[in-house]
Amino acid sequence: MTSETWEKSPNIIRASSPISSKSSWTGVLVVLATWIYLYFNVLCLLFDGIIQFLYNWDPTPIQESLTQLTSPILAADETVAFGSGKYYLLCGFGGILSCGITHTAIVPLDLIKCRIQVNPEKYKGIVSGFRTTVGEEGIRALAKGWAPTAVGYSLQGLGKFGFYEMFKILYSDMLGEELTYQWRTSLYLAASASAEFFADIMLAPMEATKVRVQTSPGAPPTLRGCAPMIYKNEGLAGFYKGLPPLWMRQIPYTMMKFACFERTVELLYKYCVPKPRAECSKSEQLVVTFVAGYIAGVFCAVVSHPADTVVSKLNQDSGSTAAGIVKKLGFAGLWKGLVPRIIMIGTLTALQWFIYDSVKVVFNLPRPPPPQMPESLKKKLEAAGKL
């Protein structure tokens, strides 16, 4: 190549690069717009399919089968007394199923979410995270942490839902009928925060084990291998060092989960459902439960995500502290992995509420309607001219 050619080449490149850059950006935008369009269409179709399934779903056959299996505990025509020991026990059982099943089902997505949080340089997004994990460790690696997830979140569900029902009734009795209605959002927040405080103590050991299995290269890949290793190296404190940030993540999450769900159900029946709840079939009521659960889940993910990132980093590195991690990551780093977590938690919360409410239907548990203003309060407000 002659010197003349070399001298002309840069000019050619400089002249043509704006066109090339513009063309490439146009292509990227077209692909991105197409992906977003297809994603939301598929999401809408999936959501519509779920709604249609729920509307057409008849829980009676399942209810009859489970009634036969549980007849020593609960007679077919027996209605459990609201606030009784059996009521709390069965609510706890519903929590075990709702949290244990759903969290275990999404272990692959949770694995990638945790790895994005603890190593964003290597795992840059959902798709690349899956590709890197499968490429380096094989398809079986996506199931890492399933056992501590199943055990830990089943225990958490037992405490979360069982204690929530207990604290909600306890605090309501303390307030009285009128204040319970007026301060119902505060009641939901207080009851869920109290329940989650104890539920996280039950979850913490398995959460520490799960994150270690999923994110630490040298850790044993199984529950029976990793838990003894943590205890041997760090003692009992190794299982609970992540408890304070776990509270920071889970308590706001659960407060939003329960309060937002309760108020969303109330608003859906008031403004969206064309007939009173008493006239809706059980399947229609479960549709409302699912929709309200998904809405609550999106808010939950955003509120609790920074603390979730801190928990993942803490359990990955045995010598780290919460304050040190926050300082190292900075504000932007705390939000890594938010998109997969919104997808995960939205779906998760909707399914949890659906399963939990289904358990109440199957076992004939009382399911009180959305709260109505007590007549005594209504008369007081009318007399004061405020109604």
Image (cartoon, rainbow, N blue to C red):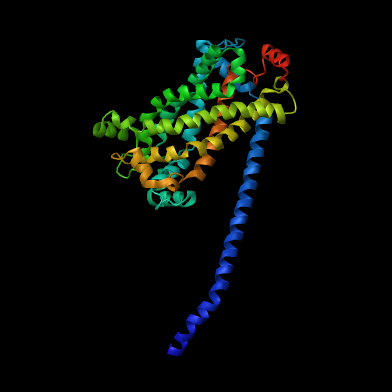
> Which image quadrant for residue 74?
top right
- Tell which residue pokes out farthest to the left in this image: 232
Residue 347 visible: no
Frontmost residue, 338 versus 35: 338
Q: Quadrant of the C terminus?
A: top right
Q: Quadrant of the N terminus?
A: bottom left
The total of numbered circles placed on residues is: 0
Residue at figure coordinates x 29%, y 29% from the top left:
237
Residue at figure coordinates x 50%, y 26% from the top left:
97
Q: Is residue 26 above or below residue 183?
A: below
- Picture coordinates of residue 12, whole percent (x, y): 52, 81
Residue 266 visible: yes
Q: Is residue 158 above or below residue 216?
A: above
Q: Is residue 34 above or below residue 226?
A: below
Apparent side of residue 2 relative to residue 21 in the rendered image (left or right): left
Frontmost residue, 38 versus 271: 271
> Which image quadrant for residue 222?
top left
- Picture coordinates of residue 102, whole percent (x, y): 50, 32
- Tell which residue pokes out farthest to the right in this image: 274
> Which image quadrant for residue 313?
top left
Residue at figure coordinates x 36%, y 42% from the top left:
325
Residue at figure coordinates x 43%, y 24% from the top left:
197
Frontmost residue, 201 versus 365: 201
- Picture coordinates of residue 257, whole percent (x, y): 54, 30
- Picture coordinates of residue 172, whole percent (x, y): 55, 15
